[in-house]
Structures are given as structure tokens and as C-alpha cells.
Amino acid sequence: MLFPTVKVPGLDDIEIFRDHEKDDTFYALRGRPRIALDDKGNPQLSFYFFSRNADIAYASSPNKELVESQLGQLLFTTDLSISEEEHNTITEYLATIVENPNHLFVRLYNKLGGGRRFMPVNRANKPIIKLGTPNTWKEGTARLELLEGLGDTFKKQSSAEVKPSLVGSNSAAFYATFGIEGAQLYYDALTKGYKGEGNNTDDLTPLQAIVRYDLQGFAYVPNIEVRVTANSTQIYDHMQTYQEDYSKTRRGGVKVVSGIGYYRKTDTRSVTASKTDIARLIEEMIDRKVINIEITDFGDVAANSEEIREVETNLRTTLMDTIMNTILPNFFQTAFIGEEKEAEGEDGTTGNGQPKPNPNVGVSASERDRPNVETHYYFRNDVDKTKINSLDFHFKKSGTVEFRRYPNGTLITQLTEDQRKQLVRHIDISSPEVQILEVQVGVNADFVADNIHSIIVNVSYSQRDAKTNVVRENSKSFLYKKGDEVYTFRVTMARNDKGQLLDFYNVEAKISYIGTADSPPPIQLNNISDRSLVISYDKLGFITVDCIAGDIDWTLIKEAIVNLQYKEEPNQPDTKKEIRLSKEKPNGNWRCYMYGHKNKNYTYQVKYLYADGQEATGREKTDTRGTLMIDDLLAGRAKASFDVILDANTVKTAKVEILYEDTALGIKEEYSHWFNATETWDWSMRLRENAKDTFKYRYFVQYKDDIVYTSDWKESRTDEDIPPIHLRRHIKALTIDGGLLDWNKWQVVYVTVSYNEPDKNYFVRKNIRLDANSMMQSFEVMAFSAEGKPFTYSLQFAKAGSATIKVDEKENTTDLLIVEEPPVVEPPAPVVEPSV
């Protein structure tokens, strides 16, 4: 029997139904899914954590900047079953109440079911309770929501919507595959668990997953007659209030900025609602009597009694689908992306497009055709309450009807240490058993400039494999005559007693020059593991330096002379070098042989020749770098970064102006930069010695409506953080609704609407005409802030043969103006002349 139902204390998520014919038979329906258990009590869940080979992961990744070194897969089954402990608790509780004729559930069941009947008892004279699960399901779905919206590195794929078994405990099987972050998240959760607080110290593991069932079945309804009514205007008004409250409390956040003389509040929240939120709204309207459920015939149940209130409570759930199908299309639009199959008007809707209630308390034909997804909705902003019919349908039934239930909840599992070892598997596929060491070998030397004849590189590998006791070895010699040759050395690698790869090899490199038998001694490189080996001057025993002009002001400096020296061998001809840098030749290089020394330190000193004939010499410095950047000795720079964030929909163009002025040195320079889109401008200028580093800036903006605004000058210092410059306008609209006026009385209403921001020199006014054919208009402006200023309006009511009625100017801060009837002006009382 669909109602009455009963819940056991402590098991609030389990709904208990009673069979309408067998008094000792009850059915338990869980409202929150759980992880199913096998016959040994283990959760039907498994998680595989894969460690991948880096090269294979890179080769298979479409995004080469993100290499997923680990992946995961989760398999699990959910159901709506009850545990053995819950079963015993329920049967014991039911046994205590079924013989209590004064219990509300028993009393209501006896009256709706046709009278009290006797139940079989056991030897202890206690009623025998048979407890099962509902087995009259017609159809249903189970949907998994897991790590939604977090990206491919969390979840790659998962079961979207599956069909549950529709028998027994309604089991449903799901899967999910995870990227690098999702795999780590679940591996930590399932191997470490979460320690509960307070008295609950068990290891609980939230699976970051929500499962939603949508079940449709048959149940018996007792002889009862119900009428559901509601006024469309009251529903409309309640929906408007709910939308405003919902946007303020349910989504996003509010940012408040205040200071001396100003206060600004920004609301960035959206107004979307889930089906659960809408169901909660309908329950609220029932509580507040916006929607009335009236039981007009309830058999033997007394009116205004505790039993009737229990029936009304159960009817809410039964009638919820029918009421929701009326509310949804009139006040919401679905956020479902895709094509929906249109319902046939004759079967599923009324003449005005409103869903047609089903007298059997089932679902309409249009709902059966609707895509079966967990839908979110947007509040409609084009609702015309004059075109919404009142909610009014009649229900009288005694027999089997369709009904729906939506068990849903977040999954939590409890794993013992043994279960963790059994259900969570770490599979390492990162290291194939047999691997090849592959080394690309090349040289980096200027054969022509340095008169090189050839370079010979010998590569050798010899390691014993601990498992097979076989020596893996190979050796190769590579001859380089031009310097652009590339060779490959390959060998099968051995492993040590721990299974680790031995990838160390030895290299010997020898250089020979043209026209001389003298050569530097061979260079030995032992136990290296480079996969790409380049024999450079550094490895051959040379010091090489590229000298590059850096931050040098060539308008002031004519030439920079760099003197380099390798002091380990001061008397050799190649250990000293003078490099002259200029605007025409901003770089040079130096190379010298180290003559067997290990120390790579060299010294350098820079002399600057100024355009006015002066000279300056820097101090001697020691370095080992291969690239040497030479800067000048000037004082520095004034610089700043300007971030201009521009809304192209409301802004035409913008400009930032900079004024640098040093009266002591007689300097005044101006800079500017135009912006047509969001952009960052990095500005800088050279400073003379003892010059100040402060400057002023301001911005200019021209909006799409050709209004121009110029900010005040602001002072800043070099390298100081300058706040971003946000340039945009905000669309602000006033909706004018004349639907409440009696248009049989008025011929036309003129609404004069104004908007003014005097500090921005912005004023807009518009005369709007309302009549019976055009009762709703809107007035849009472009405000300079999100809050904007209030609108002002005045009204003139006109009809044929009568004087115009004027309503003085007023303010509107709600952005919605509902025009109401003007106040009635009483005519002045006649003056009575005193009698003589």
C-alpha cells in the first residue's frame, strides 16, 4: 500500500510500506544508495592504480606538456538493500507497533485497509513480521555523478546512466577511469581512509560520488478522493520571491568594499536550480497553502484528525510529480544541452501547453518522452502570469497506480585493513622486464674555426645482471669529421639484486688538430647515464665564453671593451682575449684550452668609452659561465606595468598617459599607449644619475555610446604595483509591467523613465507607452557600476472623455515596476451658503 508509511527511529532514510492484503508483510525502501556487499560481507568495489612507463605515457599523451604517469579505474555496485542489523531493528520495531491499535500508523492502516485483521504470532506470542523489498518496479535508471567539472586529469570517463536490476535490492553497476590527479585522490582515500569523529572512530571513506536512482513502479492506493488547487497569481508572486531569495543565498558570493564616503556590494551569483531545489519549493508552497491539497472523500478517516494529516503528508510525495510537471514549464527552462523530443499536445499537454495531470497519479506522456537526465533549470525571465492557468485537478482512485521514488546520496564505504589489501591493487607497469639503453651521441665543436681534424668518441657498457648472472656489455667507437654527425649507442641493460636497472656507461673522447701531432690528453667520463650525450668544448677540456651586450645605453656609450684571462696558464697565447662590443657589433666569443687543469674560473674586466670622450672601468670579476651579459654602469630605469581590463562590448577605446618630470634636472617627458582590447603595457625609461624615480599617470576611456571619461592624475614610483584598470559599463534594465491594470478602464498609460549619474555626466530619459496590446515594456541603460543608481519615473493615465491623471515622479530600486491603479481623488465637498 502506497500510504500510510512508517519510519523506524534511527533509520530515517528507510521508508516502510505495508502490504494491502497480507498484514504480516512489509516492504523496506532505502532512500540513500549504498555500496553493495557480497555473500561474505565484502564491499563489491575494486580499485586499480596503474604506475606507467614515462616514455609510453609521453608518447600516448595528446598534450605533451602533461604526461600522466599514473591512471586509475574504479568498479563498484550499489543497491538499496538493508543490512542484517537494520533488518532486525525494523522487524523488532514493527512487532511492537502492529499490535498497538492506538499507534497512528496502525490506526490509519486499519481504516484505509478495511478494518483490523489478526496477525500470526510465534511461540513467544510476538507477531511474526515478514520484511522484503518492493518488487513491483516498472522501469528506472541509476545515474552516477563523480568528480564532475574537475577536468580530464581527475576523471576521464564514467558510467553516466545505467539500468538497475528492478528486482530485489535494485543493484546497479558503475565504472570510472581517472587521470593523474583523480587516481591519486582515490588511491589515498581507499588506502588511508578517513577517521570519524566523536564516538564514530571507524575508517570511513567518502567516494566523492553521488548516485541518483529514478524508480517508477506500481502500488496500491486505498479508496480516497483528493483535489489539488492553486491560484496562478499567488504561484507567480511566490516564485518571484523565491527567485530573489535563492539567488542571494544559494549560489556564489557577495563582495563588499567600503571606505570613507563610499560603499559597494557586488553580487556574482547565478540563479540556477536543481530538481531537488524545485521540489523543496513546491513543498514550501504546500506548507504556505499556495497549493492546496484537499481530501474530499477519505472513507472512515475522520476529518481534521491526526490521521488525515498523516494522509496529507503521504499525498505530497504521491502528487509531487504531477504538481512539478505543471510548475516546471511555466516558470523554468531546462539547462539540458541538446535536442529534446517534443511531446504530443493531445496526450501530454493541455491546450495552452501546460502539462496535463494524470488521474492515476503517474507521469504524463510528455515526461516519458523527455530525455532521462539529471536536469538543472534556469528561472525564466519572460513569465507572463496572465497566461498561466490555475492549478486544478481531481484525483479519485482505489486500486493500483504508478508511483515514483528517487533514492540518492553520497556513497561512503567502510574498509578493513584486509579489505584494503584485497580491493585496492597497485599495478606497476612502468618498467618492462627487458629494456634497452639507447644513447644519442654527438659533438659540439667548430671544426673549421678551431682547425680540428677529427674527434673520436668511445662508448662502453659492461654490467652483470644479478638475476641471470650474465654480463651485458657492448662498446662502440664513433668518428666525427665534420661535427654534424649523430650516432646511436644501444645495449641491453642489466639489473641489480633489487631489480633496479643499471644504466651507467663510460665514455672516452679524443680531439686531433690539423697540421700537428700534439693533441690534448683524452677526456674520461665514467659512470654517466645521459640518454643524449653531446661532447662539447666543456667535456673536451676547453673554456668557451659568449660575450653579449646586455643593458647598455648606446646613446651614451660608444664602446665597451671586455678583457678576459684564464690565470691558471697566464703565459699561453689563447688564455687572454680582448672583445670590443658596440651597437654595430654587440657580441663576441673566446675559447681557450685548460691545459689539463680542472679549475674553470676565468676573470674579466670591462672598460666603457662614452660618446663625450669620458672613460669608466668596472672592477675585475671572476666567473665560470659560458654566456657573459655585459651591462652599463648607468643608474637604472623607471618602469611600470599597466594592466587594462577592457570590456569590448561597452568600451570603444582607451589610453594610458604617463608624465615624467624632474624640475631639478630640467626633464619633462610624456608617454602614452592606446588600448582596443584587454592588454598589459610594460613601460620603462632610462634615468640619469641622481634623477628621481617617481612619475604620474592617468587614463582616458571612450565608451560605445561616445561618452568620454578622463581620470585624475595619480603618482607612482618605479616597480610599484599599479592596480589593474577595469573599464566597463553595466547593462541595467527596468521592466515595466502593466498587467494589473484594468484596460477596459484605461486607454493608454504613459510612463516617463529617467536614469541619471551626474558625476559621470550621464542622463537618459524615455517616454514609454502602455496599452492593452502592449502591457509590458523595458528600459535599458549602461550604468557605470554594478549597483548603478535608482530609476525615476512618473505616470499619466488617460482615457477618452476624461482628464489625464498624473502620478508624480518616484524612485524605483527593484528594477521591476508593476503599474497599479492610480489613487482615487475625491472631489471637493460643495460649499453651502449660510441662509439669511
Image (cartoon, grey):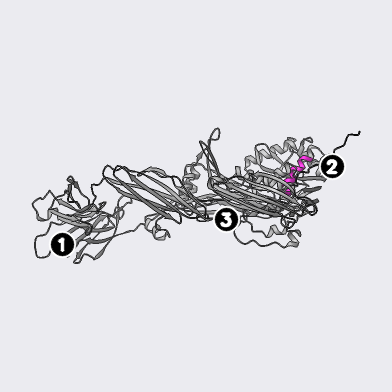
The region drawn magenta spans 308-319
Q: Which residue is mark 3?
A: 160
Q: Identify the mark nearer the N-term, 2 or 1.
A: 2
Foreground mark, 2 or 1? 1
Q: CA distance from mark 2 to mark 3?
A: 47 Å
In magenta segment, residue 310: yes
Residue 531: x %, y % from top left: 29, 57
Q: Secondary structure at mark 1?
A: loop
Would residue 253 be seen by someone viewing this image from the given angle? Answer: no
Location of residue 53 in the rendering, given as x and y in whole percent from the top left corner: 38, 56
Between 643 and 11, the one lying in front of the other is: 643
Q: Please, what is the three-letter code of the amino acid marked with disc 3?
A: Ala
- Reply above or below: 804 against 475: above
Q: Position of residue 790 (x, y in %)?
A: 61, 45
Q: Which residue is mark 1?
A: 450
Measure how far apart labels 2 and 1 are at the Cα level: 113 Å
